[in-house]
Structure formats: structure tokens, C-alpha cells
């Protein structure tokens, strides 16, 4: 107890040291990182400069409230291109199609949450969704054994999901054929005349990037979906959306719209 009081009194008497202590403590709290770059010390100087010129009594400030954001001074708006293009593409497709209800298997919760605000949407995932949102429904299930009857869903999506199945990344069992089995399930539940929005990483050959994901060639994707009709395909390479698959560009993401037709 005496040691604690000594440290507390010492910090109160030496404000610069207290400021440094609270700053580093906030880094640990918010980022779990250790101070190791000059940007941290620049932040401290800017905080002191701000305090000297702060004449707004409506907001309380204290070094105990520090919340360092040290990587936001960039010349362009930071964005992850794959999900930016993919989610916009899927949202446009669903908005144009206007299904009575949409079902998604394992895609980004952010994207599906937005889609649910203009189309009632059920989200299926092996992990529960703890957040609640009007028009968004959750059902626990595995893409390897979907809780739906054959030919029952008119509007379905699974975006950047099947490439992970069977690699153990999310605690699932190893299965070298996980992606193929997942695709078989998607086709099983899709209704005749129904639409499937689907995406996976693409490459110049089929590869396993253990344990992140698999990557597919266009030819293999179409082989796996040969019994349903391809309506549209797009490809993301780097920060650009393309109409055509380009083997020479190697790694990218393929976006596919399929329709199940009666053959």
C-alpha cells in the first residue's frame, strides 16, 4: 500500500512522467502494443500543445482519457478493396433482384447487416451473432450441412467463405475436400430459378494457402458449378475491378452470380 501511494504521489508531482505513464497504459489498453516509435512521442507533444490552447470548458480532458490514433494521417481514404468491391456488388445484385427474403451463409456480418435493411435477411453461421437488428435474422448452422430442404431458397449468398472450409482456421475439422462439399450444399438448397452470389480467391492454379484459405482457377470454379448457369463474373485484382479472369495477374478474388435452372 505504501508503495502504491508513493508511486501515485510521485506521478502527481511529475506531470510529464504521469502523462507518459497514462499514454503507455492507454496503448496497452487499446492496442496491446509496446511503445517503440517516434510517433508515440510526437503524439505526447501534440497532446501538450493541444492542452495549452484548449479554451473549451464544455469538454473535460485528462491524460487518463488518452486514446491514441497513430495511423490515420494518410493521403488517401484507407479501404480494403476486396470487401469494398465485393459487398457493393452483392448489395446491388440483391437490390435489383428484390427477393422476398435473402439467405446468407457465413459472409461478412457488416455487409449482411446493411443488405438486411432493404431485404429481410437470414444469416447462417457456425458462430452466433450477438447483435440484434430489425429485419436481420440469425440461424446457427454449418455450410457443410445447411438446415434447409433441397431446392428451397430463391436468393442465396456465400461470399469469401468456402475457401476456408476444412483448413482449421476457425476451429473446424480438417477436410481437404471442404470447399467442394460446401459448394455441393449451396447448390442443393438453391431453388430452381434461384440466384446464388458467390466469391472465392482466384489464382493461376488451385492452391492451399494454409491455414488462411484456398485459391481457385476460374476453370475449377465453373467445373464445380457446371450444373447451374453462370450469369455474371467479375474479378478483383489489387485495387481494380475487372470483367475478365486474368491468369497472369495471379492472386485475386472472383465474384460469380449463378442461377439454378431446370435441365
Image (spheres, grey):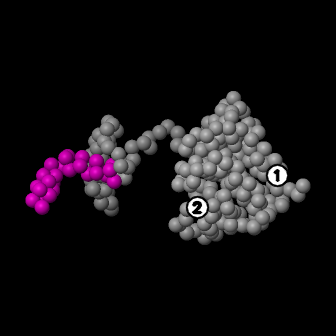
**Where's residue 246, x and y in %?**
72, 33
Which image quadrant: the C terminus?
bottom right
Could you classify mark 1 by the number of other residues whose Cα lies within 10 Å: few (under 14), some (14-19), or many (20 or more)?
Answer: some
Quarter holding residue 139: bottom right
Residue 11 belongs to magenta span = yes
- Which badge, 1 or 2, comes first in the chain's sequence? 2
In the displayed structure, would residue 112 be above or below residue 206? below
Res. 168 mark: none
Q: Is residue 178 visible?
A: yes
As measured in the structure, the alpha-carbon distance from the residue carrying label 1 to the one carrying label 2 is 26 Å
126 displayed left or right of 156: left
- Is disc 1 placed on a helix, strand or loop? loop
> What range is drawn magenta here?
1-29
**Where's residue 172, x and y in %?**
56, 55
- Residue furthest to the right in view is 263
Could you classify mark 2 by the number of other residues whose Cα lies within 10 Å: few (under 14), some (14-19), or many (20 or more)?
Answer: some
Quarter holding residue 128: bottom right
130 displayed left or right of 26: right
Please report the residue visible at 52 percent of the width from the left and 39 percent of the height from the top.
Answer: 76
Residue closer to the observer: 240 or 42: 240
Res. 228 mark: 1
In the displayed structure, would residue 246 be above or below residue 134? above
**Where's residue 253, x and y in %?**
66, 42
**Where's residue 80, x and y in %?**
56, 44
Residue closer to the observer: 148 or 9: 148
In the displayed structure, would residue 69 be above or below residue 9? above
**Residue wearing tag 2:** 126
Please report the residue visible at 54 percent of the width from the left and 50 percent of the height from the top.
Answer: 169
Q: Is residue 119 visible?
A: no
Residue closer to the observer: 14 or 26: 26
Determine the main secondary structure of the stretch shown in magenta.
helix
Amino acid at each position: 500500500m505504501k508503495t502504491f501511494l508513493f508511486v501515485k504521489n510521485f506521478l502527481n508531482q511529475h506531470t510529464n512522467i504521469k502523462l507518459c505513464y497514462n499514454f503507455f497504459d492507454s496503448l496497452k489498453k487499446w492496442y496491446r502494443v509496446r511503445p517503440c516509435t517516434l510517433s508515440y512521442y510526437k503524439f505526447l507533444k501534440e497532446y501538450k500543445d493541444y492542452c495549452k490552447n484548449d479554451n473549451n470548458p464544455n469538454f473535460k480532458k485528462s491524460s487518463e482519457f488518452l486514446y491514441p490514433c497513430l495511423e490515420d494521417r494518410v493521403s488517401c481514404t484507407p479501404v480494403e478493396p476486396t470487401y469494398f468491391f465485393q459487398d457493393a456488388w452483392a448489395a446491388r445484385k440483391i437490390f435489383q433482384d428484390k427477393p422476398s427474403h435473402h439467405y446468407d451463409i457465413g459472409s461478412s456480418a457488416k455487409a449482411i447487416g446493411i443488405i438486411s435493411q432493404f431485404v429481410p435477411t437470414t444469416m447462417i453461421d457456425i458462430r452466433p451473432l450477438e447483435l440484434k437488428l430489425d429485419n436481420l435474422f440469425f440461424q446457427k448452422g454449418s455450410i457443410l450441412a445447411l438446415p434447409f430442404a433441397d431446392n428451397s431458397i430463391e436468393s442465396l449468398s456465400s461470399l469469401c467463405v468456402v475457401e476456408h472450409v476444412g483448413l482449421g482456421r476457425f476451429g473446424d475439422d480438417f477436410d481437404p475436400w471442404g470447399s467442394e462439399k460446401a459448394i455441393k450444399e449451396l447448390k442443393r438448397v438453391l431453388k430452381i430459378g434461384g440466384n446464388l452470389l458467390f466469391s472465392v480467391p482466384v489464382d493461376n492454379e488451385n492452391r492451399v494457402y494454409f491455414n488462411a484459405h484456398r485459391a481457385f482457377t476460374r476453370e475449377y470454379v465453373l467445373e464445380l458449378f457446371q450444373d447451374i448457369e453462370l450469369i455474371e463474373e467479375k474479378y478483383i485484382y489489387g485495387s481494380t475491378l475487372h470483367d475478365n479472369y486474368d491468369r497472369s495477374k495471379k492472386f485475386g478474388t472472383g465474384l460469380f452470380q449463378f442461377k439454378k435452372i431446370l435441365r
